[in-house]
Image (cartoon, rainbow, N blue to C red):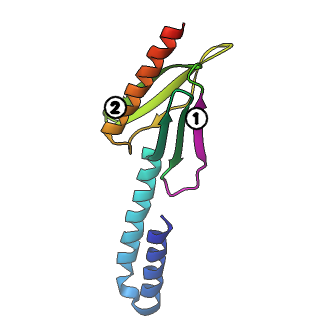
Amino acid sequence: MSVPFAVLVAVALYYLAFDGKDFKWAVIAGGVLLCFFVIMGILQLLYINVYIAPDKIRIRYKSLSPFPSPKNSVLIKPNDFHNYKITKSLFGTKQSLTLSVKTPGGVAEFSKISLLCMPQAQIDKTTKALDLLIAMNKKKD
């Protein structure tokens, strides 16, 4: 994300130094780049790595927005896994995954994880694996 910003600054400095009358194009490019950054921040695009196995459920995700953000991870023991739900928002285009776990105090939910950047085939594989874990947990109980 810093490369487009650096190019914009270089072009703006060039126009300031050599050709001040065409500086409007640098301003327009800056506005477009700023709108792009704001849209990426609103959509909350995430890079997601999902690992589901009989011994653990691990979901790692990192924001793709141009603003600094931490890397996050969810680690659940399959015996503690309770359920999941996928919700849709933004006119049905944005899907979010919410995982819930069994705790001594009841059922607790993790925060929503945006699935906007995940291909539908991978979402389907993930939900099938989670459904299988739910079925395995019901057989144990």
Sequence-wise, the earlier of marks 2 and 1 is 1
Q: Which of 14 and 49 is in front in this view?
A: 49
Query: Seen from this angle, which residue lies furthest bottom?
Result: 18
Q: Considering only vertical position in the picture, is 131 above or below 24? A: above
Residue 119 x, y percent position in the rendering: 33, 42
Q: Residue at x 54, y 22 (%)?
A: 100
Q: Is label 2 in a helix, a strand or a loop?
A: helix
Q: Residue 124 carries which label?
A: 2
Which one is nearer the viewer's eye here, 57 or 99? 57
Q: Position of residue 64 (x, y in %)?
A: 48, 52
Looking at the image, which residue is at 47% across and 44% down? 48
Left or right, residue 23 beside residue 51: left
Q: Is residue 125 left or right of residue 62?
A: left
Say if mark 2 contacts mark 1, CB within 8 Å: no
Above or below: residue 30 compared with residue 17: above
Which segment is the magenta one?
A: 65-76
Residue 36 in the figure: left or right of residue 102 = left
Q: Which amino acid does label 2 sit on?
A: Asp
Residue at image point 38% right, 45% down: 117
Q: Which of 108 and 18 is in front in this view?
A: 108
Judging by the rendered image, the residue that carries numbered circle 1 is: 74
Q: Is residue 87 visible?
A: no
The three-letter amino acid code for the residue at tag 1 is: Val
| Label 1 residue SS | strand
Residue 87 spot, x, y in % from top left: 40, 27
Q: In percent of the image, x 43 and y 33: which residue is there? A: 96
Task: Count residues near mark 1 (Cα–Cα under 10 Å), then give few for <14, some for 14-19, many for 20+.
Answer: few
Whether residue 85 is visible to the viewer of this picture, yes or no, is yes
